[in-house]
């Protein structure tokens, strides 16, 4: 895991250390869009495939029922509509697989990085100082594959800035703890700094 | 001070009036609730006994609900928080810590004007509906409450900020609030005359949007029925008589009609601008902006400068004639002051006025002192992409309409629509650009109107760098900059520039632990 050697110094060290002698990681001499990131768990692709299979079954069943029973269309038309849907589902299935392969993240010293998208390739950076809220969730299919989804929120927008599915469950929990500590460290820093200033006056 | 304030207090009975009006407004804004009544009224006549019974029952219900709300309503200021108890069956206890208070707004609805009472609206940094309102407070008491809420919240904040200068400011603040209730040094930044507001109402009006929205609605009207009306008939006869089928004259009449409705629209806009803002005054007390004004409802808005995320300078099409800008201060999304129409704005500002105003707002996170002199445009590829997609779509649809659908008349209409879309895209492309100076990023955008958004990079929450394969090939990128007030897009700029902006923002933000919202 690349994140291990990028783990920031512990809290008590930070209180005393004045100069940071850690060797700069490549992160610091590369742009945030250039660093190599860690792909999500390979099981995520399987989970996604299973989910897509369920989706396909549901969509095709409903389409068949609606066109045949409710609308009473001729068999040829029903067949062509359903096969058209089938082809679309296969294409979206492949696209989603490719997307899951692109999904990668990086836990840096000051920020969380996320990479996603095949055509619209995105690289998102959320600094810990701007982290408001972290949530960890697990759907039924994810539970079967021991996976979790991590969401990170900042202020203002209702949607998550970082939506990272396909994390191994214990790793996700660890990451959540790490993010909370980082956000907590930030809050602690604020407290100690303001105290320092009141003492000085 | 404040020993009296720390006791549970009831509101004045006058608050019933305010609650009644609020409930009534709630009923009207949820218009679907009254649709059945309007429908029955339409069918059975509005004087049907059922109608009268139902209407009076609703009115009675609203009145009773308001009285109950007043009876159960309690508030107090204690332990650095504002406590509010309300509700009959489900008792609701709101606790608003002072440091979560974003704004305290004093307003005087028209029904409180004769009795000299005010409503105090407390806006918080919580969820969208976290807003408390204390109705029917006498002026002196309202001022005192507001002072206390704002001062306390300010202290709570400055203790969070490591800024030494701010601490000094806050200690001064405490002294001055202790001395007198109204002894705060306040300097007027901007005041706007009657003519300024007339100009503002004129250039700010949304006639264009009205025309776009109203067009389809007008086409839905039952024109056959309308033509039966005598007055309309006379008007049409008059129109036919004077134009006598002359196309030039007809065009003139139509243009005159449009101009006339435009003038009417402007008049409405001007009147509402004056009612809402006159006499306009923007002042600064310590680090808080105050705006006062309003003819019908006296409003008093306060907004802390540190809380401002983005400053927007917008110029509608007609604003360009006068070379005037409107300044908006954008806050954390979800609890903007402008939730119900824009309150905290500065109307009718020339670029000279802006250059005078900005340096006075020292606590503002942006460093710029004037509008940027120039901008760097986005790459033309942005426009060429859209152009080629639009032409492709137009060709396919027109070919389909001629070949398979057998409606060749559709083709020219599609061409026209696509032509307009291309023109709109071109105008947008021409306007989109940016300017970076120090820690500020300016983004210029618009289609007909235009606006400069000034983002302090120190307020950035997240950055997103996006590249499509074609952008990658040419070394371009689209940059999304997320702030608490929303995300701004800067498409098709050079990758190195996008990266430089993003890295600059990250370098400021990762080391800045202060509260940014």
Image (cartoon, coloured by chain):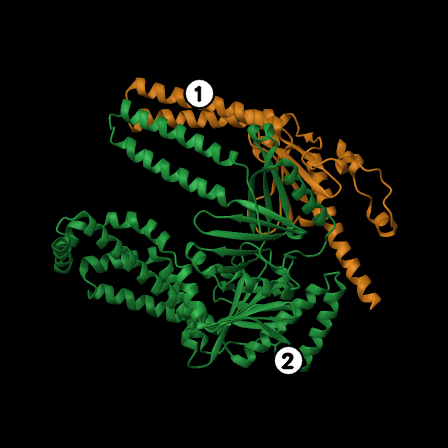
Q: Which mark is residue B32?
A: none
- Callout 1: chain: A
How many residues crowd around disc 1 within 10 Å: few (fewer than 14), some, or many (20 or more)? few
Percent of width and height locating residue A66: 34, 28
Lateral position of residue A167 relative to residue B253, left or right = right
Chain assigned orange: A
Q: Which mark is residue B183?
A: 2
Of B285 and B71, the residue lying toward us: B285
Q: Quadrant of residue B19?
A: bottom left
- In the image, what residue occupies the spot 16% across and 49% down? B246
In space, the residues marked 1 and 2 are separated at their CA atoms by 74 Å
Q: Which mark is residue A87?
A: 1
Percent of width and height locating residue A155: 61, 51
Q: Quadrant of residue B16?
A: bottom left
Can residue B65 be seen from the camera position used here? no
Q: Colour of chain B?
A: green
């Amino acid at each position: 895991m690349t994140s291990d050697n990028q783990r920031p110094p512990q809290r008590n060290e930070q209180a005393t250390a004045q100069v940071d002698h850690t060797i700069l990681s490549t992160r610091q001499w590369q742009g945030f869009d250039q660093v190599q990131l860690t792909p999500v768990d390979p099981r995520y692709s399987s989970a996604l495939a299973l989910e897509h299979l369920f989706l396909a079954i549901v969509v095709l069943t409903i389409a068949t029922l609606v066109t045949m029973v409710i609308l009473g269309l001729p068999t040829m038309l029903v067949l062509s509509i359903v096969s058209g849907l089938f082809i679309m589902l296969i294409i979206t299935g492949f696209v989603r697989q490719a997307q899951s392969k692109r999904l990668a993240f990086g836990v840096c010293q000051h920020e969380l990085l996320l990479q996603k998208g095949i055509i619209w390739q995105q690289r998102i950076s959320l600094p810990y100082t701007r982290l408001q809220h972290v949530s960890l969730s697990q759907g039924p299919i994810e539970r079967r594959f021991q996976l979790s989804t991590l969401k990170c929120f900042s202020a203002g927008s209702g949607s998550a800035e970082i939506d990272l599915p396909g994390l191994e469950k214990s790793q996700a929990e660890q990451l959540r703890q790490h993010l909370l500590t980082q956000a907590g460290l930030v809050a602690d820093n604020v407290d100690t700094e303001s105290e320092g200033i009141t003492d000085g006056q | 001070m404040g020993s009296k304030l720390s006791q549970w207090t009831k509101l004045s009975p006058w608050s019933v009036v305010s609650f009644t009006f609020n409930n009534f407004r709630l009923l009207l804004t949820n218009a679907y609730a009254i649709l059945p009544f309007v429908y029955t009224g339409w069918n059975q006549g509005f004087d049907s006994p059922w109608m009268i019974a139902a209407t009076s029952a609703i009115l009675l219900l609203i009145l009773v609900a308001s009285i109950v709300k007043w009876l159960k309503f309690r508030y107090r200021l204690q332990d650095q928080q504002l406590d509010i108890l309300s509700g009959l069956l489900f008792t609701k206890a709101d606790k608003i810590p002072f440091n979560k208070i974003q704004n305290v707004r004093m307003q005087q609805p028209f029904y409180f004007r004769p009795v000299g009472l005010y409503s105090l609206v407390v806006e918080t940094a919580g969820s969208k509906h976290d807003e408390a309102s204390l109705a029917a407070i006498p002026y002196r008491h309202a001022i005192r409450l507001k002072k206390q809420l704002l001062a306390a919240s300010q202290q709570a904040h400055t203790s969070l900020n490591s800024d030494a200068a701010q601490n000094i400011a806050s200690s001064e603040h405490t002294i001055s609030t202790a001395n007198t209730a109204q002894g705060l040094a306040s300097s007027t930044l901007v005041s706007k005359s009657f003519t300024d507001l007339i100009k503002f109402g004129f250039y700010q009006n949304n006639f264009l949007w009205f025309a776009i929205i109203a067009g389809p609605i007008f086409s839905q009207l039952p024109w056959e029925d309308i033509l039966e009306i005598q007055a309309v008939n006379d008007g049409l006869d008059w129109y036919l008589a004077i134009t006598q089928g002359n196309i030039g004259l007809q065009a003139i009449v139509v243009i005159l009609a449009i101009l006339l409705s435009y003038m009417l629209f402007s008049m409405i806009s001007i009147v509402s601008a004056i009612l809402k803002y006159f006499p306009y005054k923007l002042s600064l007390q310590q680090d808080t902006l105050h705006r006062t004004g309003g003819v019908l409802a006296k409003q008093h808005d306060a907004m802390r400068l540190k809380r401002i995320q983005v400053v927007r300078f917008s110029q509608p099409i007609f604003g360009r004639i006068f070379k005037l800008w409107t300044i908006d201060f954008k806050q954390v999304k979800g609890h903007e002051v402008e939730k119900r129409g824009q309150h905290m704005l500065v109307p009718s500002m020339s670029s000279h006025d802006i250059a005078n105003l900005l340096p006075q707002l020292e606590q503002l996170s942006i460093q710029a002192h004037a509008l940027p002199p120039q901008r760097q445009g986005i790459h033309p590829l942005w426009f060429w992409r859209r152009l080629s997609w639009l032409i492709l779509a137009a060709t396919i649809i027109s070919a389909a309409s001629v070949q398979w659908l057998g409606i060749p008349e559709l083709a020219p209409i599609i061409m026209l629509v696509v032509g307009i879309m291309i023109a709109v895209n071109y105008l947008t492309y021409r306007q989109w650009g940016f300017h970076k100076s120090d820690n500020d990023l300016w983004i210029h955008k618009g289609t007909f109107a235009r606006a400069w958004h000034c983002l302090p990079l120190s307020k950035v929450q997240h950055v997103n760098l996006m590249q499509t394969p074609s952008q990658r090939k040419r070394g371009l990128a689209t940059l999304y900059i997320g702030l608490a007030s929303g995300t701004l897009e800067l498409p098709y700029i050079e990758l190195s520039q996008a990266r430089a902006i993003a890295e600059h923002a990250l370098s400021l933000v990762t080391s800045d632990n202060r509260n940014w919202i």
